[in-house]
Amino acid sequence: MELLKQRIVEDGIVKPGNVLKVDSFLNHQIDVELLNAIAAEFERIYGDRPISKVFTIEASGIAVACVVAQRFGVPLVFAKKAQSINLDGESFTTRIESYTHKRVYDVIVSKKYLSASDHILIIDDFLANGCSLDGLIDIAETAGATIEGIGIVIEKSFQLGGTQIRKRGYPLASLAIIEAMDAETGEIVFA
Ligand code: G4P
């Protein structure tokens, strides 16, 4: 998606440790017009699928997923990061280990909001090592929901999450794929 790539080049900041800061339009201040264009692109890609819900994880996935859900005319459900899991049988739970943030956390989704009758579109802002996405897929599969597609705004293909998830056969579309980036020069190379 050219508009998005342009914006990444103009306003993205490459930080040491392979982190791309996009706080000025995606992760802190949000350019809602850009999110509308992003949602239109996901509709172009997945609009022929029988999506019943958009599914993401808090926190930064919610904004983009919200606009996508509006576009598809369906609810958005987000997985919640929990302090402690209450194993009362009323929630789906999984454990996510983030290499990026060097921590492990539990996430939960109420069984009221995800079930085997759902056809979901998973949306997230970033795909790096793919631990968050693995967690969302795990919850969706436990619920018996059908994963109709996965939409990512920015994938860093030099980290292996995307490769592994495509190998597993899931339809995965990333709107900007970054092949390499350099914190010293600020250079960003797209696939
Ligand atoms: P991981 O396995 O390396 O941890 O990668 P994963 O794809 O699971 O992403 C983990 C978290 O790190 C996600 O946020 C993701 O949005 C964020 N992230 C990964 N790489 C980058 C990057 O280059 N730039 C930015 N800005 N974020 C990145 P999260 O854990 O879900 O937390 P939240 O920030 O959404 O609350």
Image: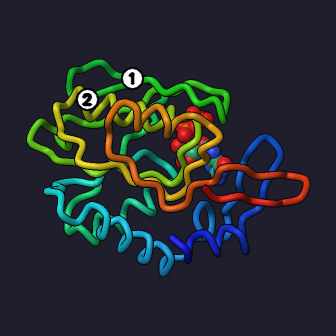
State the residue position of label 1. Answer: 85
Packing grade of label 1 (10 A; few <14, some 14-19, many >=20) is some
Label for residue 91? 2
Indicate the colouring scheme.
rainbow
Residue 52 to residue 163: above or below: below
Rendering quadrant holding ligand 1:
top right
The residue lying furthest to the bottom in this view is 33
Packing grade of label 2 (10 A; few <14, some 14-19, many >=20) is some
Can residue 30 be seen? yes
- Where residue 159 appears, x then y in whole percent? 62, 37
Q: In which quadrant of the rendered view does residue 177 lie?
A: bottom right
> At x 14% / y 45%, what residue is drawn?
118
- Where residue 80 appears, x then y in whole percent? 40, 40
> At x 60% / y 55%, what residue is drawn?
191
Label for residue 167? none
Task: Tell me the kind of residue under disc 2.
Answer: Ser
Q: In which quadrant of the rendered view does residue 10 lie?
A: bottom right
Give the SS element for disc 2.
strand
Q: CA distance from mark 2 to mark 1?
A: 9 Å
Labels 2 and 1 touching (C-beta < 8 A) = yes
> At x 28% / y 51%, what residue is drawn?
121
Task: Tell me the kind of residue under disc 1.
Answer: Ile
